[in-house]
Image (cartoon, grey):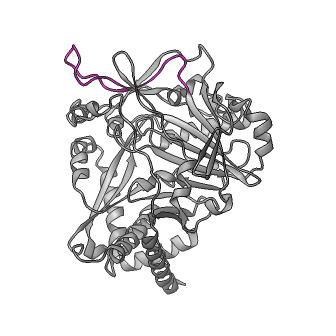
Amino acid sequence: MEAEATNNPNMALNDGLLTILEKCRISPPRNTVGERSLPLTFFDLGWLLVHPIHQLFFYKFHIRNHISSTSYSQPQTLVIDNPPTLFPVCGNLVVFPAENPSGVARKPEIRHVEGDSIALTFAESSLDFNDLKGNHPRDCNKFYPLVPLLEAASKASDFVKIPIFSVQVTIFPNSGFTIGLTNHHTLSDASSRHCFLRAWTSIAKYGTDDLFLASGALPFYDRVIEYPNILDEIHFNRNVIQTLDENYRPPQLVSPTDKVRATFILTRARINLLKKWILVQLPSLEYVSSFSLGCAFMWSCIAKSRFLFEGKNGHENEVERFVCAIDWRSRLDPPVPQTYFGNCIGPCFATISSTILTGNKGFVTAVELVGKTIRETVKNKHGMLKDAETWFRSFVVKIPTVGVAGTPRINVYDLDFGWGKPKKYETISIDYGRSISVNVSSESPEDLELGLSLPAKQMDLFRTIYGQELEKIISKEI
């Protein structure tokens, strides 16, 4: 990996919360990648105008002096020694004009050319590291400076070039540091992103890519997904391409906001008690997954807190929507490798009336509905791509929606750069809307870690409802 500094330390302040120490560009060694491209598929194209993904990892380590003396002069020691096999993260999203001499619209692609690089920022924060990595409600404004922005789009000869990945390392003197990552969603879904991060941490920890190469987890870049061409045409008909010109700027989180974020832990013991109670309420239900149970509990509590926060007038007859992602790699016909790099997920929708969701049986009904919807979606292998034509029409309908970011199938706490595993993980991008993050816990992969971002007053209501509902059920099962 080659690094190039682009400005001097201590050159900028961000509202007193952050000092920019250095900005660098990190690129693969010369003559190792050349020009390579990945055409976007239907699964990627749907994310063209969606907000970026922001991830934040907290690591406990006293590195202020180490970074000052060593890593600022050699920043590549803190970031990926990017082998050619991971070239897409250094590339750009390339978008061609909707109208061209051939009369045929050309699909966007992720392209790497010699000299492409990752934007890397080193910063220092005076905020309280231990407070930020807690589970209690914390001011969302404090987190936004810790995740990097994507750089601006630029015009080339016959296309627009949009950066897709950036990294920020923020030091908290005598406490620890964070690694903030931002990627354009067309680059990858959660599975591909985690595959990349595991490769990155393995190379950083051991100083070689031998273990990564021997793991059999090399990214699979061939575009082998089979689907009707009409699905690509849907995106071209949505005037998306015309929007992605040289003036395009990806959405970003803006301060000030009145939101706070909090983390809720469902331990395995509590999950088992909740499952036991649900199966008593629904004796015909044979199985309840921890994922559907945790999501349904959060969904019902969010709906109840929203009613109290916004007032019930006009909300009684509303329909509420729950959305989670299904990984289709192994479920397509024919299937694609699990290491397929890119996006290969589709939405799973569940809807319910607000009256039912906020009623006494709201949680029970939500568990049954979420589980049933996921099972039916997964079993619908042949109809999944056919149904894809209606995905965007479903999103156009503006109703209260809770989405899910993350999955407990991926352990975000196994990412060790050589300084130990992260002490806390936050999905900052849930702040763009009404989403929850669902991951395994830092304490145990059998526990669920549920993240939520809400206006401060609604969060107070949510925490009260969450605690009361949980205690009411558990007290009956102990």
Above or below, 460 relative to 151: below
Assign the C terminus to one quadrant of the image. Answer: bottom right
Residue 96 lies in the magenta stretch: yes
Question: Residue 456 location, x and y as percent?
Answer: 46, 69
The quadrant holding residue 68 is top right
Q: Residue at x 60, y 41 (%)?
A: 168
Which quarter of the rendered picture does the N terminus lie within? top right
Quadrant location of residue 446?
Answer: bottom right
Given residues 403 and 178, the one toward you in this image is 178
Q: Does 353 appear above or below 441?
A: below
Which range is magenta? 95-117
Residue 305 lies, in percent from the top left, at 38, 74
**Total label count?**
0
Dominant secondary structure of the magenta stretch? loop
Q: Is residue 205 above or below residue 277?
A: above
Can residue 1 be seen here? The reply is no
Relative depth, front residue between 409 and 279 = 409
Q: Relative to 136, is 434 on the left or the right?
A: left
Q: Residue at x 42, y 72 (%)?
A: 458
Measuring from the top left, give residue 328's x and y in whole percent: 38, 43
In the image, farthest residue toward the bottom: 476
Left or right: where does residue 341 sit relative to residue 315?
A: right
Q: Would you say 89 lies left or right of 280 here?
A: right
Residue at the image position 33 percent from the left and 35 percent from the top:
45
Which of the two residues, 94 or 476, is positioned nearer the viewer here?
Answer: 94
Q: Position of residue 399 (x, y in %)?
A: 25, 61
On whether residue 434 falls in the magenta region, the answer is no
Instruction: Please tell me in which quadrant of the rendered image residue 386 appears.
Output: top left
Instruction: Work out whether residue 3 or residue 40 is closer to the camera in this orientation and state it.
Output: 3
In this view, 245 is above or below 478: above
